[in-house]
Image (cartoon, rainbow, N blue to C red):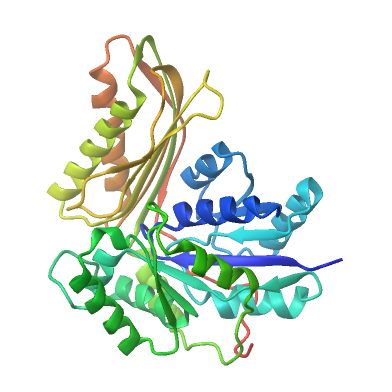
Amino acid sequence: MPKARYIMIGGFLGAGKTTAILKLAEHLTAQGLKVGLITNDQSVGLVDTAMLGAHGFDVQEITGGCFCCRFNSLVDAANQLSKQIRPDVFIAEPVGSCTDLKASVSYPLRRIYGDDFSVAPLSVLIDPVRALRILGLEEGKAFSPKVVYVYRKQLEEAEIIVINKIDLLITERLTALRNELARQFPNSRIVEVSARKELGLVDWFDTIAVSDLGVGPSMEVDYELYAEGEALLGWLNCTVAISGPDLIDGNQFIRKIANHVQQSLKDALAEIAHLKLTFNPTEQGNDIAVLNQVRNDHPAEMSHELADPVREGELIINLRAETDPEMLNGFVSRAIAQVIESYPGWAYEIVHEEHFRPGKPEPTHRFVEA
């Protein structure tokens, strides 16, 4: 029996990993392969899982920590998918604030379960505007040095750095970014894509579908500094049941909530890492609205829109920003209440809500050599 393929696509919050993973899953499915997806978050109630599931893919969600700290859960998730559909390819999306994935996930998976999986090179996606700022090529709001440490470590371990959203940059800015990445991270292959616009994807997909994870020593990581950087990010996951007497535009509804949250974060001088919302109508099958916002100074974008008005449904909000999580909870709670108030007769119930700072990463395994 041939080995299943394990492909992990990392990258900082807001880099566009989920959209890229969806396109990869569709690409492989079109080739006749069965695909299983594994999502990951520090808490339950993940927008990514809802969005990928709405496209008909089998998805397992690992919560309560990143893949490195929940390695056994990652293997269990793969086994569960194997019982369901026997995937030819597993695609895994780690938490966007995690790094050291080769040493704590890819190398252990190959060493311990090498008879079951062939492991692809680690790809790390970047949002080009954020990267230009963090690498010092352009002015603009970025993150504090400890958060930037985590961001740069993600790039350092990448075998393939994927500049995503190239449609946002003119040629000169893209060239400057590519050259700086090549200078600072000379051991990484650099590719340029737009997952949303489906530009440059096939060559990258074909590479990670057949190439194997490299060998060599793991990078050095200061886990105290890594933990402090992650802990500067506030985390909020919220699931809300919403209903009303009249049909409304669900796309406009979640735009209003995002706008309220964005303005609150701007006023507090708190930088968004990623704000994601989905609205899944109760009576419309797999139809779903999906909104993303990746910077304070960038408008929210709808990657999926509802085709018809809605009367009730489930709203999921995932918000990560460099600020106090209690503050995030207040911003989101007020946004929901104020927007609902503008729809006469509508009501909501918060089904689940968690806000916190991520704990110190403690990998199940960490191999210093491939």
Q: Position of residue 362 (x, y in %)?
A: 56, 72
The N terminus - image quarter:
bottom right
Left or right: 158 as drawn, with respect to 230: right
Can residue 210 be seen in the rendering of this structure?
yes
Left or right: 342 as drawn, with respect to 102: left
The residue that appears at 18% across and 77% down in the rendered structure is: 137
Establish if 356 lies above or below 204: above
Left or right: 367 as drawn, with respect to 126: right
Q: Position of residue 215 (x, y in %)?
A: 61, 89
Count of numbered labels shown in the rendering: 0
The C terminus - image quarter:
bottom right
Residue 138 or residue 261, whichever sits in front: 138
The residue that appears at 22% across and 78% down in the rendered structure is: 176
Establish if 280 lies above or below 123: above
Left or right: 7 as drawn, with respect to 276: right
Establish if 197 lies above or below 97: above
Q: Position of residue 253 (x, y in %)?
A: 30, 26
Can residue 322 be seen in the rendering of this structure?
no
Q: Quadrant of residue 17?
A: bottom left
List the single residue furthest toward the right. 1
Q: Position of residue 141 (x, y in %)?
A: 17, 64
The residue that appears at 36% across and 57% down in the rendered structure is: 14
Q: Quadrant of residue 58?
A: top right
Residue 355 or residue 207, whichever sits in front: 207
